Image (spheres, grey):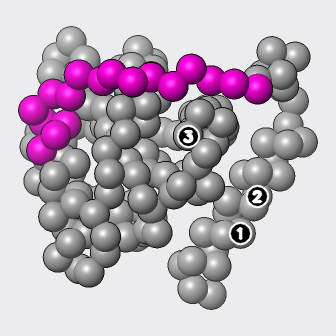
Amino acid sequence: MNAKFLRIIATAAVVIFTMVSCSSPEEASIESVEVIQFYDYSEIENETLDLINKYRDSVGFSKLEKINHISYVSSEHSDEMVQTNIIGHANFAQRQSNLHIALGALEVGENVAFNYSTPKSVIKAWLKSQSHKDNLDGDYTHFGISIRENEIGQKFYTNIFIKK
């Protein structure tokens, strides 16, 4: 099976799981989300987004447009990873729902990483991982990022892609 078909199946599974999973009454009644207009990008965040667009351009994909709200949502997840010291995609369905409601996202993808010291090193690692590369190469239109450090300087990356 090709990667696009598998991605469609995986997305459908997440949507079905989200629809049938337990949720609190608060989660079930979310109808609107405040769209965050401002995000203060660090130099390393801007550099990472620039490198992603340079990579996409070099392989014939369209460049992605940065949206502050996506970076804010990314920052919530990066902050959570710093606090728990757990790297992963916990609560991805909530981020996906937020972006669907707030921005009209039709598709959402996410890359996370831990303890890469430079933007070049994290992009290189993502390109070596097929699932991360699929997101870098994906049919997305917009993106955002958050890079947070813990108390000993280890970096936690959350990079979210959407298609509007």
- Given residues 104 and 151, the one toward you in this image is 104
> Circle 3 — which element?
helix
Question: Which is nearer the N-term, disc 3 or disc 2?
Answer: 2
- Given residues 37 and 2, the one toward you in this image is 37
Question: Mark 1 belongs to which amino acid?
Answer: Ile
Q: Does 32 sit left or right of 77 as displayed?
A: right
Position of residue 24 relative to residue 140, above or below, is above
Q: Is residue 87 at all visible to an observer of this figure?
A: no
Q: Is residue 14 at all visible to an observer of this figure?
A: yes
Residue at 62%, 24% in the rendered image: 33
Q: Are marks 2 and 1 in contact (CB under 8 Å)?
A: yes
Q: CA distance from mark 3 to mark 2?
A: 22 Å
Q: Which residues are magenta?
A: 31-47
Q: Position of residue 28 (x, y in %)?
A: 84, 25
Q: Does 127 sit left or right of 76 as displayed?
A: left
Residue at 44%, 68% in the rendered image: 138
Q: Closer to the observer: label 3 or label 1?
A: 3
Question: Mark 3 belongs to which amino acid?
Answer: Leu
Q: Position of residue 120 (x, y in %)?
A: 11, 53
Numbered circle sitting on residue 9:
1
Q: Does 91 sit left or right of 79 as displayed?
A: right
Q: Main secondary structure of the magenta part?
A: loop
Displayed quadrant of residue 3: bottom right
Q: Quadrant of the N terminus?
A: bottom right
Q: Position of residue 94 (x, y in %)?
A: 64, 32
> Circle 1 — which element?
helix
Which residue is label 2 attached to? 13
In magenta segment, residue 33: yes
Q: CA distance from mark 2 to mark 1?
A: 6 Å
In magenta segment, residue 28: no
